[in-house]
Image (cartoon, helix red, strand yellow):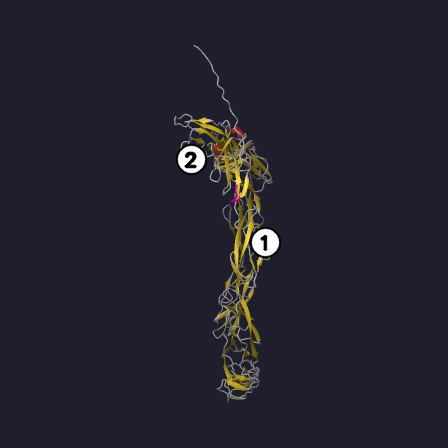
């Protein structure tokens, strides 16, 4: 039972305030000296671009931008870390352009790209040394160098070579003379390709030996280009002698069998063609005796041996082609115009039965078949003869039939005879005016004339009268109003015999004044016949006071429907029951029943007639709107899962208080931290009736939803006790957690992926880490935590 005690003190030292120094920016190939402070010993990482990782101020020569981590240990062996970034700017990708070739005396524009500022060398033969695109005008092959500096003050160098070629020695050949319209072949030498100018008069301005045929004396310049694309030029003159001004004489006109003497001038020697109708083709004035119109061409040659041609036309007129026209057939008593063509003056014979013997188109009125002859003379005095036969036929004997009587609105069939084709007039009231037996339906008495044509096209006519009797004026009287069960005495005038329809509800349908007793409004038609057997009709309406309502309907609870009364007009309306009605004394009240209701309406008019009808307004059932929800903290806000528990719904509309909606049956939504939120669910059933449910809640701040517990020691020895270094966060916050562990030398041992926030004490390749102190960096949605932990196995 003896007791004693002792004390141990655990001293907790602060971590050193380690600084890795200021961030730096260098160009690729340069170095930067780092400078750490705040500890006793240092370890830098990564090591591959540092001069010494175990000093406070190593030299860094990275090839790309890199973050250097320094882990500093103080005299108490406490560890902390810091990071410095060395930004490495790449050198500008400088391009002086591709090598190029010019001809001596030319200028070429250089173009450097990839930098901001430029300096060119050598200075000779450049328009400006400090721009990207100076002009180069070197007279010998030269290599130009350009130094380019970018916006980060990093520089690079490139070069371009400009080759200079000599010009070719071009020759266009000797001057030449030709006649107008002749041509000559030019010949250029000394180059590889050629372009002649002017191009007019040349067969091809892009070859060395084009054919030249200028209209006037012309100097042609040829520009020759060699294989180095260098050009030079030369000139050749082509002199043009004018052609002789040749005249073949004046055109002439002759008749068949006549001759004409030609006469050419303007040259030294002549040749005529065609030769077959000329007396001599080698003199200036041969005799021509063509049998048809001929163009004679004369070719003349002058003292320069230049040749020209001219043409003279000898027109040979043939005899006129007189045509008296085709043979004709006429009917006796007709006149037909004759028409002769092909001449200028005409004389007809025989003289009897013609209106004029000396014109081209006299009228013939012969009463017997006759042959007429015409003699025609053209403008050249040539004469020819032709004839025409005019045959005379007798007229047909046409009959239109006997006169006929009809009632207005009826038809009568006409019947013509004695011909082959018929035309009736007037055409009004006829079914077809071009047949022998049309149906005639005139509006009043009409005389129809038929013109008949026989197979000789001879015409005659006849007339028939269609007498139209008026219809009786049948009057059934004014419409009548009666009550249900009542009767009305009808009365018709204007005819002799009557027939009423419909016959049902009439005591006698073949008298002028039957008694009508219909049970609903009825239109009665009466047909009357007068002494000419003409028929007409009239109608009268017996209005029976009857009503009907709008069809039965159904509505959602609380909805309103308008009732309607149709049929006869009333002056007094009485709806029962009046519960749920806007007005029980009008024809169209608004109904808002709370349950299915049969509404009865009684209607009367000023005549004391009464009728009744009903309409059923049914009430649809409502759905039940309800839902549950669960709030889950997440990275961007609170993540709320909604579960629909509604009854009888077929469509759903979720309305969130941030202006967004959703139509899924079950849904989810993210609301911002630190604000109240509300959600309304509208549920609609199969009948289209809606109902809603709403909830309101508050979202706390992000920090209110989690507490971070970070242990400082763990023992990953496989005994299932404290085997993991574990970070726990609630809900979906793990989606925005970044967790890293480093050893004392700044090497990364573990990095979280997804929701894996457990470290088992191994490296990323599965090797066990040694016992000791490790640094951790924890980032939860932008909020950072760091510290150390101890691993014991």
Is residue 760 in sight in this rendering?
no
From the viewer's perspective, is the residue at label 1 or at label 2 nearer?
1
> 411 or 159, which is in the foreground?
159
Answer above or below: position of 99 versus 238. above
The residue carrying mark 2 is: 764
Residue 448 percent coordinates (x, y): 54, 67
Give the SS element for disc 1. Answer: loop
Label 2 Cα neighbours within 10 Å, binned few <14 / some 14-19 / many ≥20: few
> 195 or 225, which is in the foreground?
225
In the displayed structure image, the side of residue 127 where residue 719 appears, left or right: left
Residue 450 percent coordinates (x, y): 52, 69
- Which is more N-terminal, label 2 or label 1? 1
Residue 22 percent coordinates (x, y): 55, 37
Give me the residue at 58% from left, 58% from top: 124
Farthest residue in the left direction? 718
Q: Which mark is residue 76?
A: none
Label 1 Cα neighbours within 10 Å, binned few <14 / some 14-19 / many ≥20: some
Give the SS element for disc 2. Answer: loop
The quadrant the C terminus occupies is top left
Farthest residue in the top direction? 1
> 443 or 685, which is in the foreground?
685
The residue segment tinted magenta is: 27-31
Residue 352 percent coordinates (x, y): 54, 84
The quadrant the N terminus occupies is top left
> 182 or 631, which is in the foreground?
182
Answer above or below: position of 213 versus 548. below
The residue carrying mark 1 is: 131
**Gap between marks 1 and 2 measured at Cα:** 54 Å
Total numbered labels: 2
């Amino acid at each position: 039972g003896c007791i004693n005690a002792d004390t141990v003190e655990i001293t907790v030292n602060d971590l050193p305030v380690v600084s890795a120094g200021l961030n730096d920016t260098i160009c690729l190939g340069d170095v930067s000296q780092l400078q750490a402070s705040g500890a006793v010993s240092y370890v830098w990482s990564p090591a591959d671009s540092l001069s010494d990782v175990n000093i406070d101020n190593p030299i860094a020569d990275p090839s790309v931008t890199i973050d250097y981590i320094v882990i500093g240990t103080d005299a108490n062996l406490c560890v902390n870390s810091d990071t410095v970034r060395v930004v490495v700017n790449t050198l500008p990708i400088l391009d002086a352009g591709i090598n190029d070739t010019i001809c001596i005396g030319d200028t070429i524009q250089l173009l450097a790209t990839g930098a901001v500022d430029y300096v060119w060398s050598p200075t000779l033969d450049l328009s400006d040394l400090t721009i990207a695109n100076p002009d180069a005008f070197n007279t010998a092959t030269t290599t130009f160098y350009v130094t380019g500096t970018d916006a980060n003050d990093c520089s690079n160098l490139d070069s371009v070579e400009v080759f200079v070629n000599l010009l070719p020695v071009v020759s266009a050949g000797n001057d030449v003379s030709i006649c107008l319209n002749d041509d000559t072949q030019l010949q250029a030498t000394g180059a590889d390709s050629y372009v002649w100018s002017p191009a007019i008069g040349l067969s091809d301005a892009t070859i060395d030996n084009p054919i030249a045929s200028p209209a006037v004396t012309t100097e042609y310049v040829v520009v020759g280009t060699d294989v180095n694309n260098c050009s030079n030029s030369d000139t050749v003159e082509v002199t043009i002698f004018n052609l002789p001004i040749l005249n073949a004489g004046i055109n002439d006109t002759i008749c068949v069998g006549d001759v004409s003497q030609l006469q050419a001038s303007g040259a030294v020697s002549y040749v005529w063609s065609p030769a077959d109708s000329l007396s001599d083709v080698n003199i200036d004035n041969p005799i021509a005796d063509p049998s048809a119109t001929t163009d004679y061409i004369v070719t003349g040659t002058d003292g320069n041996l230049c040749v020209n041609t001219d043409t003279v036309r000898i027109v040979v007129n043939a005899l006129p082609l007189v045509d008296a026209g085709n043979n004709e057939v006429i009917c006796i008593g007709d006149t037909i115009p004759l028409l002769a063509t092909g001449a200028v003056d005409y004389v007809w014979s025989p003289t009897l039965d013609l209106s004029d013997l000396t014109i081209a188109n006299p009228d013939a009125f012969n009463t017997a078949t006759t042959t007429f002859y015409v003699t025609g003379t053209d403008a050249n005095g040539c004469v020819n003869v032709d004839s025409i036969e005019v045959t005379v036929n007798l007229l047909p004997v046409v009959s239109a039939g006997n006169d006929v009587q009809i009632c207005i609105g009826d038809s009568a069939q006409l019947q013509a005879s004695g011909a082959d084709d018929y035309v009736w007039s007037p055409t009004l009231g006829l079914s077809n005016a071009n047949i022998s037996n049309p149906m005639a339906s005139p509006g009043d008495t009409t005389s129809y004339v038929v013109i008949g044509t026989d197979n000789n096209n001879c015409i005659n006519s006849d007339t028939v009268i269609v007498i139209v009797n008026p219809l009786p004026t049948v009057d059934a009287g004014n419409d009548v109003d009666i009550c249900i069960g009542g009767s009305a005495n009808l009365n018709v005038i204007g005819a002799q015999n009557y027939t009423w329809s419909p016959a049902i509800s009439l005591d006698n349908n073949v008298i002028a004044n039957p008694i009508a007793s219909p049970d609903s409004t009825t239109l009665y038609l009466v047909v009357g016949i007068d002494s000419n057997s003409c028929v007409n009709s009239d109608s009268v309406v017996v209005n029976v006071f009857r009503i009907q309502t709008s069809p039965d309907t159904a509505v959602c609870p609380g909805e309103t429907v308008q009732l309607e009364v149709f049929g006869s007009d009333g002056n007094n309306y009485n709806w029962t029951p009046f519960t749920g009605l806007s007005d029980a004394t009008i024809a169209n009240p608004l109904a808002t029943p709370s349950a299915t209701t049969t509404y009865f309406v009684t209607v009367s008019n000023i005549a004391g007639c009464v009728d009744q009808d009903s309409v059923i307004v049914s009430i649809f059932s409502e759905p039940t709107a309800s839902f549950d929800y669960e709030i889950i903290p997440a990275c961007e806000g609170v993540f709320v899962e909604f579960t629909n528990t509604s009854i009888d719904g077929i469509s759903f509309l979720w309305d969130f208080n941030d202006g967004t909606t959703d139509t899924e049956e079950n849904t989810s939504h993210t609301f911002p931290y630190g604000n109240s939120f509300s959600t309304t669910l509208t549920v609609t059933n199969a009948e289209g009736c809606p109902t809603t449910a709403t909830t309101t809640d508050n979202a706390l701040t992000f920090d209110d939803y989690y507490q971070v517990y970070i242990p400082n020691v763990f023992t990953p020895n496989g005994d299932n006790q404290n085997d993991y270094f574990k970070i726990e966060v609630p809900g979906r916050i793990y989606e925005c957690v970044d967790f890293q562990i480093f050893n004392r030398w700044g090497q990364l041992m573990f990095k979280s992926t997804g929701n894996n926030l457990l470290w088992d004490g191994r490296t990323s390749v599965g090797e066990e880490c040694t016992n000791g102190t490790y640094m951790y960096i924890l980032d939860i949605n932008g909020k950072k935590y760091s510290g150390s932990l101890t691993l014991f196995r």
